[in-house]
Amino acid sequence: MIRKLISRVFQKKSPKKGEPRIFKLKSHGITANQLTPCALKTVKTLQQAGFKAFVVGGAVRDLLLRRKPKDFDVATDADPDEVRHLFRRSRIIGRRFRIVHVMCGPETIEVSTFRTVAVSTNNDSDDRQTDQESGRILRDNVFGSQVEDAMRRDFTINALYYDPVSQEIWDYHNGVADLKAGVMRIIGDPAQRYREDPVRMLRAVRFAAKLGLKLDPAAIRPIRELAELLEDVPAARLFDEMLKLLFSGHAAKSILLLRKKGLHHGLLPTLDVIMEQPMGERFVMLALAKTDQRIGEGKPVSPAYLFAALLWHEVLAAWRQYQTEGEKPVPALHLAMDVVLAAQSEKLAIPHRYDAVMKEIWTMQPRFLQRAGQRPFRLLEHPRFRAAFDFLMMRCESGEVDAEVGRWWEDFQDAGEHERGQMLIKDEAPAAKKRRRRKPKSEGLGVRGEE
Ligand code: ATP
Ligand code: MG
């Protein structure tokens, strides 16, 4: 209560319009050597050439949270050509926003010129355009002042500028106080900012989950109503955002947060797919938790593996359906995979380059139930065995497949050649015969009935 009051007083006592609060080293404790040499060099070179230059956005926020920044972005009043000329290893990228990539060794620093943004639906000059009906920004590549640059950013905690030379943080929107209070607040009117760029709704949830911050109620309120605006966002951009959410290291938490707030519905087709399969929910949450765990441990993760998991229960349902209609298990599985992938590529824009690996993981699943003769040995040699086996273990853990199958494969891998020979389940008929003997519904699936 008292903290709230203090913070409210603090909020009101903002500096004159357009002037930032400036925090000195002793109040924030961030030193220049916490930047990478490349980030430091980029800022210094720009400043020595007479330009303003700051580290901005996520890196400042993460350093204040005592987290390791993912990468460093620099904001400057130099235009892209001026930046380009200062750094030998640099290139201008982007058509909509021209930004400069400055490279040192393996590192790339993204340098963007201070920009301004369209401020209202009716502001339709040559330089600033919004879509009249939705309020969406069509162009925001207009250079502006630092104040304007701070204004166009999404959250107060993302509008912090750190100057490693003076070791000051420039805070235009009370981001430091919000960070201390653990709140994520939108700069400006949330509904308007979401209309300008609907992807901000997803960013809000992603950052809240990843950083363990509370989303300001004002930022949550308009989402339900405006979620449908995401439909107009190009699929490729949504897919990029979805990747960031799924591979943030906090995917499970992000998805739960979306659900808790009732935001999942219609927010993103992928999430609908995940949430609308009650039977597969356990499996999907398990896959997300495992992905989070791997990222936390610094291990590599494969998008194809995660997509294969997200879509598995759809494939399973279609597979069953085709078999009920009289297809044999193997062709039925291929039909199911094709139909699910075709639907997803339209809806979710999962690039086709992942299809082959997803299919391999899926088609190997029934083969885990064939444990006689040479089959298990051949499966073990498959280059994708590890991924398919991990996938099988998740199916066991979620209760879809008998845990005994997973244990058998674990033992089989550990066993010596002789032991392996003894482990074979001799009376298990080869797949072709078995298929003929079994009833259509459970043919070759070895899957437990899901109620
Ligand atoms: P991350 O750790 O995920 O990289 P980040 O805050 O650095 O977090 P980026 O997507 O790299 O996020 O964007 C850099 C900065 O650009 C943000 O901090 C924010 O200030 C601004 N920004 C990015 N996307 C938007 C957007 N859609 N609307 C407004 N500002 C944005
Ligand atoms: Mg970033």
Image (cartoon, rainbow, N blue to C red):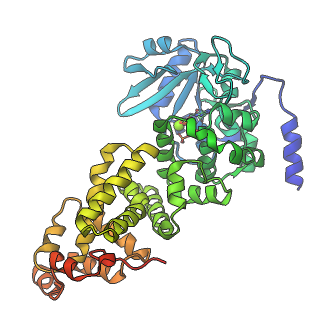
For the point 62% across and 26% down, which residue is it? 137
76 or 232: nearer the viewer: 232
| Percent position of residue 282, x then y | 49, 69
| Percent position of residue 234, x then y | 50, 34
For the point 45% across and 14% down, which residue is it? 86
Could you tell whether 391 is left or right of 60 in the image?
A: left
For the point 28% across and 53% down, which residue is it? 357
Above or below, 404 against 413 in this view is below
Q: Is residue 446 visible?
A: no
Above or below, 245 against 130 in this view is below
| Percent position of residue 174, x then y | 76, 36
Could you tell whether 195 is left or right of 251 in the image?
A: right
Residue 409 sits in quarter: bottom left
| Percent position of residue 412, x then y | 21, 78
Residue 191 sits in quarter: top right
219 or 362: nearer the viewer: 362
118 or 420: nearer the viewer: 118
Could you tell whether 448 is left or right of 21 in the image?
A: left
Number of callouts in the render?
0
Q: Is residue 88 visible?
A: yes
Q: Residue furthest front?
A: 325
The quarter in which the N terminus is drawn is bottom right
Give the quarter the ligand 1 occupies: top right
